[in-house]
């Protein structure tokens, strides 16, 4: 018998949730991570009394009561509601697009006036069959919203001209004819009090964890330790890039401590003009309604992924999706390896979806779990 039933590669939300579920069923797990901390991209670093979302803003939101109840076992959530603001050349607009945005743009005061303004702009464009993201956005919201609030931000985020991006990226652009700045429609939303580390620490409580440990550098050793491997890393890296690397967008974060109590008055401000190289500034204290006399901000710079960088957003175009299918077929033949999570599945997941995916996988593997 090997020392562990599972060696879980990656201490992010998928790996930690899988390990927790396995442990609740009496199975032995070792969790390893190449980083110096657990939590993956939801890791929070506490500085100056502020929980810094070290790898970008994370706002938990879900309509799934089961997932909401699950995460509330490990942390209490505050009432934070995501209501970002867009800055375009010094002009401020509420997001998502709603009656506040339309009033700021055009001075319209009723839904009928705002709808007519959009209809007039859309009808003048004569776009019957959008061929790319630019045409899709224009066909949905017209020129003013597109030029000020979509074009520059999107092109920075993806590193490509909007006309060179597929239309499906922006198919379901949220447009509301109510005065509602809540970005998400989900029933449950908030930030864990004390930061996301509270949840990760709860999930991994009583489970052996080894950090600064790279599975890909010594696969045979870790296979000798566990009956099965749970792999949450990049699927193309697992197979030594046999079919070529999958494309991602990456991010660079510039953290700055400021000796003042309030920098921008909101947790997230998007910078939508093309000439500003970062996409947004995050002021972390506002996620937890902080009253500290000091603040920490983070500028977020998008970048094309290269080896050695973190992968954030899969570029799910036709070429990459076809390449992923080749890797997926190889993964299906790995009988002693379970693949899961956003990198192993080459899929953008929100946090609740990652947790749900891990819980569903353990349920399929082990059956229903009864919680005390």
Image (tube, helix red, strand yellow):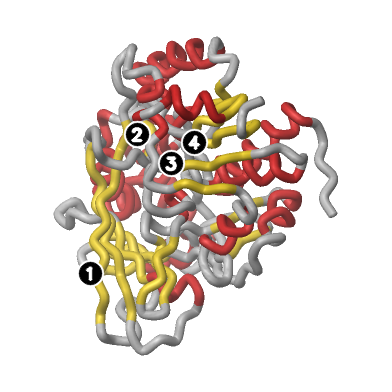
The disc placed on residue 90 is 1
Q: Quadrant location of the C terminus?
A: bottom right
Q: Residues within 10 Å of mark 2 (few under 14, many from 20)?
A: many
The answer to whether the residue labelled 1 contacts the one labelled 2, judged by CB atoms less than 8 Å apart, is: no
* C-alpha separation, residue under disc 4 versus residue under disc 3: 42 Å
Q: Give the CA distance from mark 4 to mark 2.
A: 36 Å
Mark 3 or 1: in front is 1
Residue at image position (48%, 69%) is 109
Query: Residue 257: percent from the left, percent from the top?
Result: 26, 75
In whole angstroms, how far apart are the C-alphas of marks 3 and 2?
11 Å
Q: Which mark is residue 140?
A: 3
In whole angstroms, how far apart are the C-alphas of marks 3 and 1?
25 Å
> In x, y percent, where is residue 356?
65, 41
The residue carrying mark 2 is: 133
Q: What residue is at 48 percent from the left and 52 percent from the top? A: 39
**132 displayed left or right of 170:** left
- Whether residues under marks 4 and 3 lie with C-beta atoms below 8 angstroms apart, the answer is no
- Where is 291 relative to 5, above or below? below
What residue sits 63% from the left and 36% below the top?
Answer: 357
Label whose residue precedes the other's in the sequence (3 or 2): 2
Mark 4 vs mark 3, foreground winner is 4
């Amino acid at each position: 018998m090997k020392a562990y039933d599972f060696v879980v590669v990656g201490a992010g939300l998928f790996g930690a949730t899988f390990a927790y579920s396995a442990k609740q069923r009496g199975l032995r797990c070792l969790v390893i991570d190449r980083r110096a901390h657990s939590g993956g991209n939801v890791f929070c670093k506490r500085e100056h009394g502020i929980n810094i979302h070290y790898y970008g803003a994370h706002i938990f939101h879900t309509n799934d009561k089961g997932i909401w109840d699950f995460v509330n076992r490990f942390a209490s959530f505050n009432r934070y509601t995501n209501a970002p603001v867009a800055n375009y050349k010094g002009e401020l607009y509420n997001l998502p697009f709603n009656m506040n945005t339309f009033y700021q743009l055009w001075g319209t005061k009723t839904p009928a006036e705002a709808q007519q303004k959009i209809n007039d702009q859309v009808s003048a464009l004569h776009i019957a069959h959008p061929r790319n993201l630019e045409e899709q956005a224009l066909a949905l919201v017209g020129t003013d919203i597109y030029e000020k609030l979509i074009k520059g931000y999107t092109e920075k985020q993806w590193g490509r001209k909007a006309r060179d991006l597929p239309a499906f990226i922006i198919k379901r652009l949220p447009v509301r004819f109510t005065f509602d700045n809540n970005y998400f429609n989900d029933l449950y939303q908030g930030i864990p009090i004390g930061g996301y580390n509270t949840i990760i620490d709860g999930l991994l409580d009583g489970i052996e964890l080894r950090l600064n440990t790279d599975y890909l550098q010594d696969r045979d050793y870790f296979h000798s330790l566990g009956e099965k491997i749970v792999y949450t890393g990049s699927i193309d890296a697992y197979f030594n890039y046999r079919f070529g690397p999958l494309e991602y967008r990456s991010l660079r974060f510039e953290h700055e401590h400021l000796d003042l109590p309030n920098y921008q008055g909101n947790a997230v401000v998007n910078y939508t003009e093309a000439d500003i190289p970062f996409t947004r500034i995050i002021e972390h204290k506002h996620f937890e309604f902080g009253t500290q006399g000091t603040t920490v901000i983070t500028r977020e710079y998008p970048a094309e992924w290269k080896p050695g960088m973190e992968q954030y957003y899969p570029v799910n175009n036709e070429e990459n999706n076809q390449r992923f299918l080749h890797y997926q077929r190889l993964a299906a033949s790995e009988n002693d390896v379970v693949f899961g999570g956003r990198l192993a599945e080459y899929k953008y997941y929100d946090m609740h979806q990652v947790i749900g995916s891990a819980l569903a996988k353990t349920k399929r593997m082990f059956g229903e779990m009864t919680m005390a």
